[in-house]
Image (spheres, rainbow, N blue to C red):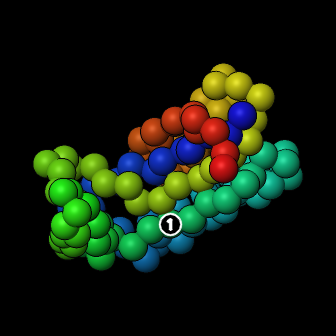
């Protein structure tokens, strides 16, 4: 089963110091390597800040494009992983490793299916 592990960040708490970023990259890199070694890694990556996003909506045949997401929340999606594991318990175990490495919340969501 495929799961999305969403890395939730508060962009208002950024940037970290160079030292904090290097330590974070080292911790996260170690978990990335563990996922790849375990054969569960499908895809993953960090995202540019939410203000770089464009939202496209089509309503009644009319297309509207706006800058950034419209959500009143402190947390934004800062990155994500797609993993393939046997069940939710396995996905949660990997998300726990990521949460510890990233030191931010990880949202776990199963895919409906893969196209």
Q: Residue at x 60, y 30 (%)?
A: 92
For the residue pair 101 and 64, the one nearer the viewer reads as 64
Residue 40, position in %: x, y?
78, 46
Q: Which residue is mark 1?
A: 46
Where 12 falls versus 6 (above or below)?
A: below
Q: How many numbered discs? A: 1
Query: Which quadrant holds residue 43?
Result: bottom right
Where 112 falls versus 98 (above or below)?
A: above
**76 left or right of 61 in image:** right
**44 left or right of 76 in image:** right
Query: Which quadrant holds residue 20?
Result: bottom left
**56 left or right of 30 in image:** left
For the residue pair 74 and 23, the one nearer the viewer reads as 74
Q: Quadrant of the N terminus?
A: top right
Q: Residue at x 46, y 50 (%)?
A: 7
The residue lying furthest to the front in this view is 61
Q: Is residue 103 visible?
A: no
For the residue pair 40 and 102, the one nearer the viewer reads as 40
Q: Residue at x 62, y 60 (%)?
A: 44
Residue 97, position in %: x, y?
62, 40
The residue lying furthest to the left in this view is 72
Query: Which quadrant holds residue 47?
Result: bottom left
Residue 23, position in %: x, y?
54, 64
For the residue pair 111 and 43, the one nearer the viewer reads as 111
Q: Residue at x 46, y 39 (%)?
A: 107
Where 44 falls versus 104 (above or below)?
A: below
Q: Is residue 104 visible?
A: yes
**17 left or right of 60 in image:** right
Q: Circle 1 — which element? A: strand
What crowding class fits label 1: few (fewer than 14 Cα within 10 Å), some (14-19), or many (20 or more)? few
Residue 101, position in %: x, y?
56, 49
């Amino acid at each position: 089963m495929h799961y999305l592990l969403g890395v939730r960040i508060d962009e208002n708490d950024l940037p970290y110091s160079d030292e904090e970023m290097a330590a974070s990259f080292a911790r996260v890199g170690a978990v990335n390597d563990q996922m790849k070694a375990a054969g569960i890694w499908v895809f993953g990556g960090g995202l540019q800040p939410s203000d770089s996003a464009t939202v496209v909506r089509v309503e009644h045949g009319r297309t509207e494009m706006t800058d950034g997401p419209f959500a009143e929340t402190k947390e934004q999606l800062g990155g994500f992983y797609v993993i393939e594991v046997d069940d939710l318990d396995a996905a949660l175990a990997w998300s726990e490793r990521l949460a510890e490495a990233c030191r931010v919340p990880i949202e776990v969501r199963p895919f409906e299916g893969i196209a």
